[in-house]
Image (cartoon, helix red, strand yellow):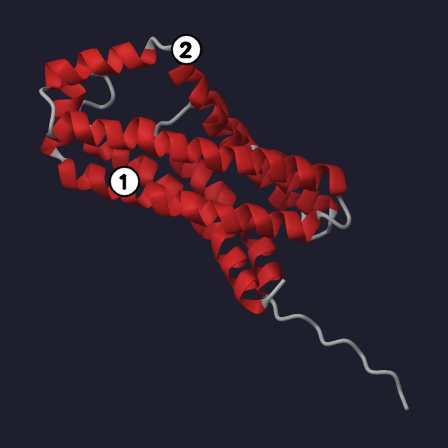
Amino acid sequence: MGRFAQTLGALGIVTAPMLVGAADELRMISDDTSGEAEGAAQFEAIARNLDLFQGAAWLALAGALLTIPAVAAAWALSKDRSRVWAWSALVLGVLGVFGQVVHLVGYYAHQLLFATDVEPAIGARVGEALESQTYFAVMFVPFFFSLLAYIPQAVGLRRAKVIPLWAAMVVIAATVTFAVLGSTPLSSAVWTLGLVIGLAPAAFHMARPPVPALQPAV
């Protein structure tokens, strides 16, 4: 792996979850109905805080893009000593990237459209119609793989001795907590902080310059 790829991978490992977590927090702040309203009322709330929601959308896009080198870097770090976990994390990670793209279009792009260029009542009806479609719901399933991928990733990195046991446990605990509690200001913050702290040793490991091979004595 080249030096540029190493740097990008190291950056992605910690920056991708940071950006996705920040996007989630900003998204919740922009919805000043505290998530209690749906449909037209939610679109109106987003329209009132359009800059915040647009910021969340751009952060989510950046996070999805950086997830690509992050997934590749985690696989490269663990594939030689933990093949099963490394490949499991890679498959889930790739599916998760696809899911993030679907989420960017199916959620952020649609919400922006309904909040700015479509009558809120009409947008609510279109949104309900989309959610009732099985195909549309199935397309969102890979998005959850972007969350679950961190579990085999943490195990693989630990088995490859890239991260210590405590770091793997932090990543797994943060992921399980977020999966159980869902997206709330507190659970999202805990998830983001847990991933950044737990995966930081892997980022440092990836960022280190390669050790030059010893030349045989002549």
Q: Quadrant of the N terminus?
A: bottom right
Rendered location of residue 32, percent (x, y) = 17, 28
149 left or right of 216? left
Residue picked out by circle 1: 56
Q: Is residue 100 above or below residue 16?
A: above
Mark toward the start of the polypeptide (1 vs 2)? 1
Q: Quadrant of residue 132?
A: top left
Real-space Cα distance between discs 1 and 2?
A: 27 Å
Q: Is residue 20 above or below residue 187?
A: below
**SS assignment at label 2:** helix
State the residue lying farthest toward the front.
135
Q: Residues within 10 Å of mark 2 (few under 14, many from 20)?
A: few
Residue picked out by circle 2: 134
Residue type for callout 2 = Thr
Q: Quadrant of residue 151?
A: top right
Per the rendering, the mark at residue 218 is none
Q: Is residue 59 above or below residue 115?
A: below
Taking depth in this image into account, of 196 and 85 the one nearest to the observer is 85
Q: Is residue 158 visible?
A: yes
Q: How many marks?
A: 2
Residue type for callout 1 = Ala
In percent of the image, x 18 and y 21: which residue is there?
42
Rendered location of residue 127, percent (x, y) = 24, 16
Rendered location of residue 194, percent (x, y) = 50, 41
Q: Is residue 32 visible?
A: no
State the residue lying farthest toward the right.
218
